[in-house]
Image (cartoon, helix red, strand yellow):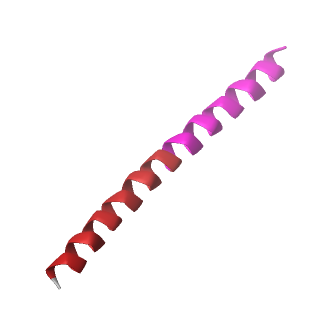
Amino acid sequence: MEVSDESEEILALSIHEVNKVVLKCLIVEENYNSIVINTFISI
């Protein structure tokens, strides 16, 4: 029982880390897209 609880906790942490990375990538991509759009508008 203890082992499965521990592995579930590790799994939850891993998923959380992956989500943070994905979210960061999405934010960066969104910022990049708006920079590109703003650059086109200013030209």
Image vertical order of residue 37 relative to residue 4, above or below: above
Q: How many marks?
A: 0
Residue pictured at 34% horizontal, 66% vertical:
11
Which residue occupies the extreme left position in the image?
A: 2
Image vertical order of residue 7 relative to residue 43, above or below: below
Image vertical order of residue 13 relative to residue 8, above or below: above
Which residue occupies the extreme top position in the image?
A: 43
Where in the figure is residue 31, as x and y percent of width and height? 61, 33
8, 40: nearer the viewer: 8
Where in the figure is residue 7, as x and y percent of width and height? 27, 71
Where in the figure is residue 30, as x and y percent of width and height? 64, 39
25, 33: nearer the viewer: 25
Residue pictured at 36% horizontal, 58% vertical:
14
* Residue 1 shown in magenta: no
Q: Quadrant of the N terminus?
A: bottom left
30, 41: nearer the viewer: 30
Give, as a single range, the part of the protein colored magenta: 23-43
Image vertical order of residue 9 relative to residue 24, above or below: below
Where in the figure is residue 9, as x and y percent of width and height? 26, 69
Q: Is residue 19 left or right of residue 5?
A: right
21, 2: nearer the viewer: 2
Q: Quadrant of residue 34?
A: top right
* Residue 31 shown in magenta: yes
Q: Is residue 7 left or right of residue 38?
A: left
Residue pictured at 55% horizontal, 41% vertical:
25
Q: Main secondary structure of the magenta part?
A: helix
Residue pictured at 79% horizontal, 16% vertical:
42
